[in-house]
Image: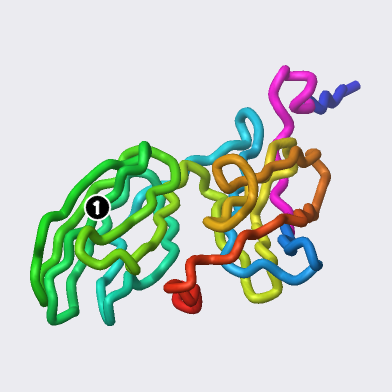
Amino acid sequence: MVRRFILTAAALGLAAPLVAAPLTVRVVDSSGRPVRDAVVTLYPAGGAARSAHAAGRYVISQQNMQFHPFLTIVPVGSDVSFPNYDNTKHHVYSFSPAKKFELKLFAKDQSRTVHFDKTGVVALGCNIHDQMSAFIVVTDSAWTARTNGQGIVTFADAPNAPGRVVVWQPYLRAPGGEVQQAVAATQRSASFQVRLRPPPSSMAMTDY
């Protein structure tokens, strides 16, 4: 008689494979209106975590006396170039702990490049034009995206694993401009209601 043995992952002491499934996150303001362009990051626990990998070069231009785009998400280890398309010189800088740098005066059609090797939020300014501001979010999670016009982000390949979801927005009323909540392994949606302060009067926030 032939006996057949089926060895399961549990019997072998191996972890069961993590099955990916969509996770949808919705962000609304205190009045229930969708919050567009909030940065949502999923941090799965343990072995389900996956690092973001830098690929290519990112661009934040200076044009019409503004930074374009206003908000940029880059993986840690990325290079970002800052071309100047204005007829005046710009002096780009940041005092943020994630990246302190200074690009001294450079003129039209000139560009400078900065390497971002630490996670966090980098606030940009121009020493010559106070109305110019922008933000870079440097992430180490493969699951990082901004909300759409309906205030929604969907991570199509989120693992069935516990973790946490972090929401950041430059005008969010919370320490560090962010809020977070835990998610269960089988949870397929999460929602946040946040309070926002008005942006500076010089910032229309229409160009992200």
User: Within the image, what quadrant is residue 194 found in?
Assistant: bottom right
The quarter of the rendered structure image containing the N terminus is top right
Q: Who's the residue at 69% across and 66% down the image? A: 152
Dot 1 amino acid type = Tyr
Other-residue count near label 1 (Cα within 10 Å), few / some / many at <14 / 14–19 / ≥20: some
Q: Nearer the viewer, residue 141 or 19?
A: 141
Measuring from the top left, give residue 91's x and y in whole percent. Answer: 17, 60
The reply, left or right, for residue 172 in relation to residue 90 is right
Q: Which residue is mark 1?
A: 93
All told, the count of numbered labels is: 1
Q: Who's the residue at 57% across and 56% down the image? A: 169
Residue furthest to the right: 1
The reply, left or right, for residue 149 in relation to residue 118 is right
| Residue 133 in sight in this render | yes
Vertical placement of 194 versus 86: above or below? Answer: above
The reply, left or right, for residue 141 in relation to residue 184 is left
Measuring from the top left, give residue 87's x and y in whole percent. Answer: 13, 81
Measuring from the top left, give residue 112's x and y in whole percent. Answer: 15, 60
Task: Give the extent of the magenta segment.
Answer: 8-24
Q: Secondary structure at mark 1?
A: strand
Q: Nearer the viewer, residue 48 or 57?
A: 57
Q: Nearer the viewer, residue 23 or 34?
A: 34
Q: Who's the residue at 80% across and 53% down the image? A: 188
Vertical placement of 87 versus 208: above or below? Answer: below
Vertical placement of 135 versus 49: above or below? Answer: below
| Residue 22 in sight in this render | no
User: Within the image, what quadrant is residue 21 found in?
Assistant: bottom right
Residue 38 colored in magenta in the image: no
Vertical placement of 49 versus 69: above or below? Answer: above
What secondary structure prevails in the magenta region? loop
Measuring from the top left, give residue 90's x and y in whole percent. Answer: 17, 66
